Image (spheres, rainbow, N blue to C red):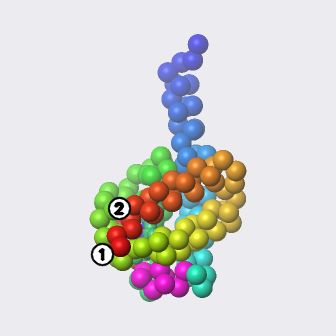
Amino acid sequence: MTSDAEAKDVAKETTPYDMIGGEAVVRRIVERFYDVMDSAPEAAGIRAMHAADLGPMRQTLFEFLSGWLGGPRSYAKCIMSAHRPFAIGDAERDAWMLCMRQALTDSGVTGELYDLLDGAFLRMASAFRNR
Ligand code: HEM
């Protein structure tokens, strides 16, 4: 029989946040994501929509992703509303996904976990389209 404490441990260990490798890997993904956005020619259009200094965004995206993946929560805004001021269509969605796919791969996320995250990011990024 499984005790409550053991059951809680299992639930805790199976969040996507833990499966990814916790804070260190989420940070790595975010760093890589903005480095790719800052350098990939395919991302030049969406890079220009972001502030010149990506430093604050690295922290904001980290906080959002931590909570979204089932880890510590500190991002409290509506992510959908935050994107309304920007013109986002298929091209912008695809450029964002290119950066995230590269960031996941470069951070060692593979196999089923990659597929799970890729699908979830694609659904969210598609929902942000407003034109
Ligand atoms: C799954 C998809 C996405 C996630 C998780 C995400 C995440 C975020 C977060 C957490 C912020 C900070 C919002 C705030 O101020 O609180 C943000 C801002 C922003 N996002 Fe996204 N985003 C996604 C898709 C996109 C797409 C497709 C675009 C296309 C252009 C985009 C463009 C922007 C821009 C321009 C900002 C403002 C940046 C700045 O102020 O410098 N995002 N995003």
Instruction: Give the crowd class for mark 1: few <14, some 14-19, many >=20 residues within 10 Å.
Output: few
User: Magenta residues: mostly which secondary structure?
Assistant: helix
Magenta range is 43-50
The residue closer to the viewer here, 18 or 80, is 80
Q: Outermost residue, top direction?
A: 1
Q: Which residue is mark 1?
A: 85
Q: Which one is in front, 11 or 36? A: 36
> Do tag 1 and tag 2 residues touch (Cβ < 8 Å)?
no
* Residue 55, position as x, y percentages in the image: 47, 77
- Residue drawn 58% across the image and 71% down it: 99
Compared across the picture, whether 92 is left or right of 33 comes to left
Figure quadrant of the N terminus: top right
The quarter of the picture where the C terminus appears is: bottom left
Label 2 beta carbon within 8 A of ligand 1: yes
Q: For ligand 1, give the image quadrant.
A: bottom left
Instruction: Mark 2: give few (<14), some (14-19) or many (20+) Cα within 10 Å.
Output: few
Residue 68 rendering spot, x and y as whole percentages: 45, 52
Q: What residue appears at the point 56 percent right and 63 percent down from the top-left corner?
A: 27
Q: Who comes first in sequence, dot 1 or dot 2?
A: 2
Res 31 seen here: no
Residue 128 visible in the picture:
yes
Residue type at numbered disc 2: Ile
Tell me the residue that label 2 is attached to.
79
Q: Hey, what amino acid is under mark 1?
A: Pro
Magenta stretch: includes residue 37: no
Residue 109 occupies quadrant: bottom right
Compared with 46, 32 (above or below) is above
Q: Which residue is located at x 63 percent, y 49 percent? A: 113
* Label 1, ligand 1: CB separation under 8 Å: yes
Residue 18 as seen in the image, left or right of residue 129: right
- Helix, strand or loop for disc 2: helix
